[in-house]
Image (spheres, grey):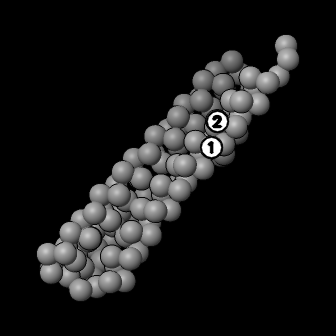
Amino acid sequence: MSVVGATGVQVPMVPVPAAASAATSGSASASAPASGSAVFGDVLRDVMAREGLAAQQAAQAIQSLAAGQTDNMHAITLAVAQADLQFRLILELRNRFTEAYQEIMRMQI
């Protein structure tokens, strides 16, 4: 499902996957870690895909403004802000993963 803004820019409505409910709904069997990692991988892949889409939409909105096709600054500002937020989310995930990896490497076995 998607929503078309006043400028004609199509904004997709992507639901956030229920990673927590999918990970806890399975029984405590040997296949549970595999499904949990698959859900985590899917969530990560989805975040990366949405960031790419948000960046494309922001670039399209800026190009339409530069070409004089639109004068709706609200929609353009919103598209750029969404792309910025997605990018900051990915940076924060990278930072947290790096910190977790460094913490694991500091552990003594």
* Circle 2 crowding by C-alpha within 10 Å: few under 14, some 14–19, many from 20: few
In the rendered structure, which amino acid carries the disc numbered 1?
Asn
The answer to whether residue 57 is seen in the rendering is: yes
* Residue at 28 percent of width and 63 percent of height: 59
Question: x, y percentage for residue 32?
Answer: 66, 26
The C terminus lies in which quarter of the figure? top right
User: Which amino acid lies under the numbered mark 2 shown in the image of this protein?
Assistant: Thr
- Against 16, residue 63 (above or below) is below
Residue assigned mark 1: 95
Q: Which residue is mark 2?
A: 98
* Numbered-mark total: 2
Does residue 25 appear in this view? no
Side of 39 relative to 75 (left or right):
right
| Helix, strand or loop status at disc 2 | helix
Q: Is 28 left, or right, of 69 in this rendering?
A: right
Q: Position of residue 2 (x, y in %)?
A: 33, 66
Which picture quadrant has residue 40? Answer: top right
From the top left corner, tell me how far across and down residue 58 is, in percent. Answer: 32, 65
The quarter holding residue 82 reads bottom left
Q: Are marks 1 and 2 in contact (CB under 8 Å)?
A: yes
Which residue is painted at 50% across and 62% down in the image?
Answer: 85
Q: CA distance from mark 1 to mark 2?
A: 5 Å
Closest to the observer, 46 or 61: 61
Q: Quadrant of the N terminus?
A: bottom left
Q: Secondary structure at mark 1?
A: helix
Identify the residue at the far top of this view.
109
- Residue 91 image point, x, y percent: 55, 49
Q: Among all residues in the image, which is located at the extreme bottom?
A: 71
Judge by depth and name the residue closer to the eye, 46 or 90. 90
